[in-house]
Image (cartoon, rainbow, N blue to C red):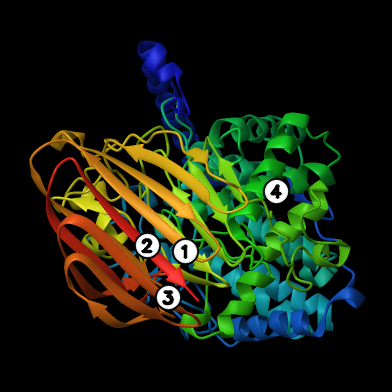
Amino acid sequence: MKPRTLYRHLREKPVVTLVGEATWRGIKTIRQWRLRNVSRNGDCPVRFRPIGYYRCQRELVSEQSRQSILGYADAILSGEYPLMGYGSPSLGVNPDWHCDWVSGKRWPLEASRNLLIVRHDGSDVKVPWELSRLQFAPVVAKAHLLTGDNKYRTGLQCLLTDWTVRNPLEMGVNWTIAMEAALRGISLCLTMDLLWPFTSEEQPWLDLLTRSLWQHLRFIEAHSEFSHVLRSNHYLSNIVGLTTLSAYLHGPGMSHRLEKYARAVDREILLQTYPDGGDCEASTGYHVLVAQMFLHSFLVQQRCGRAIGREFETRLGLMFQWLSVLAGNEGKLPHIGDCDNGRVELLLDDISQSVLSSCARHSLRVGGLSGLASYLLKLGFGGDRADAVWFGYVGGSTLRSEDKPISLMPDSGVAIARSREAVAVFCAMPNGIGGKGSHTHCDKLSVIFRLGADEVFCDSGSRGYTRSAELRNLYRSTKAHNTLVVDDADQNIIPSGHQCLFQCGNEAAVSAIEVSGDAEETRVLRASHRGYSRFGIEHQRTVHLSETALLLIDELSGTGEHMLDLRFLLGPEWHVSSETGTGQAVSCVIDGSRHLTLRCEAESSLTLRVLPAEISREYGSYLPASCIQIQTMASLPASVQTRVRWD
């Protein structure tokens, strides 16, 4: 596989790039100074106008969808906020917008430019940020449209007024980065579109929110997360938010802004995704967020009558085909890399989980989102008009996934092998964001194995980011994934210290995934990585999937004796009932919805243990699980074979 970076010109013309970056930072400083002056005089030269983002057909809303929407909206009005994996905390009808309610720590209402957002005191800034994205607001507005009950309209207006008054521009933790302002601005625009038209009595509220939207637009422009060196979903959120705000605000210069930012979105899809449709951040969770950003922008541009570029629409279609292939018929993506529950707007898949138990929730349910994209982009792999009404709020779509024996996304470094009942997802993803790996895990050559609807071997997920550096690094470490650890070292070197929670080394260069085998009987995938080249070792894994067995062959080149540590993280639904723990062949029985046996063989003596473990399917929470650990001290070169059979 050719090495891929977002910005190859950094290597080719580093001086030009760095001069451009320095110039841009100077421009940004001037914009921020101007914003502080503008915020003092309070001028608002724009007015709000709806664009008809939603096509409301209440008669097509199923009773189940209706109850999910109303139940969620009622929870919000009673002061309960179903957010991420933290349950539904009772924060009151006027919540503390600046507090991490999990740790009890809060940020002062001071100039946002002076605040530390990551403080290493057990707090997590994502908690107040998530609340202040206001993504619950369009759901409450939909409840008003469904019922005509003004309690939703007036309750929502009071709540948004409270946020606006208690979060003055550039004050407090919710005005610290442009991404949060962009996602919040989108939520406000969609809410006001749903509540339109407003009465004369509501005009002061409309003026207050319109002025807030203008402030959001100016803030994002002044604090843009653009960079000539590296760009990510943060900058994408900025320009998607600016496109939406420019579409909804009418006034001098707004048409020019809309065209400018829409063109930027069109360009960015080709920079932040691979030709096979995968997001460049090596994360299924961020693929969902980025795909929804692009789909939202597609729809905004369409509603404004802007012609959609062919390249943009084609690449967007590939992003959702990528989702469909990986999610399968259950509509659940495996957790690969980071996932923080990020969304542009909440769809039915998101809100319907708020009443489920923690073990039943899964933050990467994408059936509704994929069904919506299939309808809007005419992709044909799931979804119909009823699924698209109100954008995912009518029924859950069932994806029709590929039934090919092997699907390969060569640029993303992911392959999926399928037999009659089983699916094996093979990961050989290059580090995201040009090697920086902000949301990449040490999961090279990891296998996620699904039998029927259940993941037998699953990924660790992402329990959190900044609340605990130790947990953050544990969940992205090699030992938290279904691959091989050498000498207790990570494939990519994870820097120590609290300042490096979104960095990792780029040592584990991966090969292209090779595909071979008899498609009628055995599917074969093979790849290697060089993360242990510092020990003179290269790791190659071959995956064989047949109708009744999964065979993994791990081969290590090199010299000397080394500790090899194979890990298999079981889904919470599975447990080990018996085991044979030592010898050149070790085995165990895995029970759950099915009965499986795992047997591992090597020329050296093996030891099998079952360790307690944790996985996360939703940011902020975890589920108890088990990890099968197989260790051996082997003289290289060496080979270890692991075979899983099922009834």
Residue 295, label in figure? 4
Look at the picture and state if 361 lies above or below 228: below
Q: Which amino acid type corresponds to the residue marked 3 in the rendered image?
A: Leu
On the image, numbered disc 3 is attached to which residue? 596
**Which residue is pictured at 16% across the width and 34% down the height?**
534
Q: Are marks 3 and 1 in contact (CB under 8 Å)?
A: no
Instruction: Count neighbours of disc 2 (C-alpha within 10 A) and say few if under 14, some if 14 to 19, many if 20 or more.
Output: some
Using the image as rendered, state which of residue 197 and residue 550 is in the foreground. Answer: 550
Q: Residue at x 39, y 46 (%)?
A: 542
**In terms of sequence position, does the residue under pointer 2 or pointer 1 come before the other?**
1
Please report contact status of discs 4 and 3: CB closer than 8 Å, yes or no.
Answer: no
Which residue is denoted by mark 1 in the rendering? 549
Measured as percent of width and height from the top left, residue 414 is found at 50, 45
Circle nearer the N terminus (4, 2): 4
Residue type, numbered disc 1: Ala
Between marks 4 and 1 in the image, the one whose residue lies nearer the viewer:
1
Image quarter where the N terminus lies is top left
In terms of secondary structure, where does tag 2 sit?
A: strand
Labels 2 and 3: the sequence-earlier one: 3
Residue 427 visible (yes or no): yes
* In front: label 4 or label 3: 3
* C-alpha span from label 4 to label 2: 41 Å
Residue appearing at x 90%, y 70% in the figure: 57
Q: CA distance from mark 2 to mark 1?
A: 7 Å
How far apart are the two marked residues, 4 and 3, measured between alpha carbons? 41 Å
Q: Secondary structure at mark 4?
A: helix
Secondary structure type for disc 3 = strand
Instruction: Give the labeled residue for mark 2.
Output: 643
Q: Secondary structure at mark 1?
A: strand
